Image (cartoon, grey):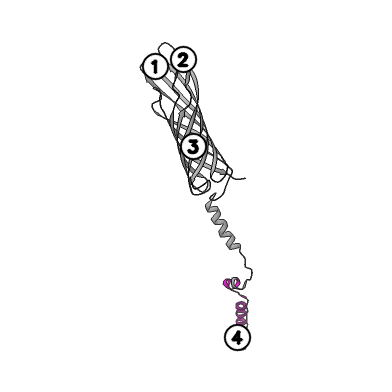
Amino acid sequence: MKKILPIILLLMFTDILSAQMSYIPYKSCIKTGIDVDDNNTNTEVDKRRRRRGRRGKKSMLAVGGSMATMKIFESSFDDKFRIGLGANAWLNLSTSNAINANLSYFFPTSQEVGDIKNTSSYFLINVHFQQFIVGDNSEDFGLYGLGGIGYIVNFNKTETPAYDISARYTNINLDLGVGAQFNLNFGFLFAELQGSLGLMKYEIPLNPADGVKVPSYINFRTGIKIPLQF
């Protein structure tokens, strides 16, 4: 038994020594130019990319939804802020500019002046060119100017003691505004302030000669913009 014990100890020492001789530290691999397994490094990079989401990615198309409020001027029946919902689409021409199409519906509101009750709602289509002043389409923050045209439809019902009138008025507006967007990783939060100037005037079916001043208005909307990756 006493003779076997030194043999066992010798074998254990030999195994430990051979293991240490076959081990090459990671730093030595780099210094000596020996190839190393970069799976761990790639895994960390992938994790960072997943955490960043869409940050830094450039997409040609984007879609989104928005909430909006609109204040119409030059109308005795539309002296309140209106609330609406919208859908948006973007076509990025480059990292610094884009074309945006927006469709918004503003819910009906009713107002009364004497014995006359007026109920109206609005459907709005905007097509804007956006030019980034600060940042671009893919950075964490971007500030841009916008300009274009808008097409507005007013669904109007007027009720009086003698008769009711249902009409639909349409008009084209000139739009100018500013906007900003913030990176949320999965998409962008955007906010826009727009002013619109009516280019024509509505015609009243009963008396087209009088007409109605077209609605110039201000419009604030905010929503989510999600780039589409293919």
Residue linked to disc 3: 66
Q: Which residues are magenta?
A: 4-29
Residue linked to disc 4: 5
Dot 3 or dot 1: first in sequence order is 3
User: Disc 3 residue type?
Assistant: Ser
The percent coordinates of residue 82 (x first, y second) are 42, 29
Residue linked to disc 2: 209
Q: Quadrant of the N terminus?
A: bottom right
Dot 1 or dot 4: first in sequence order is 4
Label 4 neighbour load within 10 Å: few <14, some 14-19, many 20+? few
Q: Nearer the viewer, mark 1 or mark 2?
A: 2
Q: Is residue 78 magenta?
A: no
Majority secondary structure of the magenta segment? helix
Q: Quadrant of the C terminus?
A: top right
Dot 2 or dot 3: first in sequence order is 3
Q: Nearer the viewer, residue 223 or 206?
A: 206
Which residue is located at x 47 percent, y 35 percent? 176
Question: What whole-number distance in Å separates the C-alpha atoms at marks 1 and 4?
Answer: 112 Å
Residue linked to disc 1: 116
Q: Nearer the viewer, mark 1 or mark 4?
A: 1
- Left or right side of 162 for 89: right
Q: Nearer the viewer, residue 163 or 206?
A: 206
In the rendered view, would you say 222 is above or below 2? above
Q: Nearer the viewer, mark 3 or mark 4?
A: 3
Dot 1 or dot 2: first in sequence order is 1
The percent coordinates of residue 129 (x first, y second) are 53, 37
User: Disc 2 residue type?
Assistant: Ala
User: Disc 4 residue type?
Assistant: Leu
Q: Nearer the viewer, mark 2 or mark 3?
A: 2
Q: Nearer the viewer, residue 122 or 194?
A: 194
Q: Are marks 2 and 3 in contact (CB under 8 Å)?
A: no
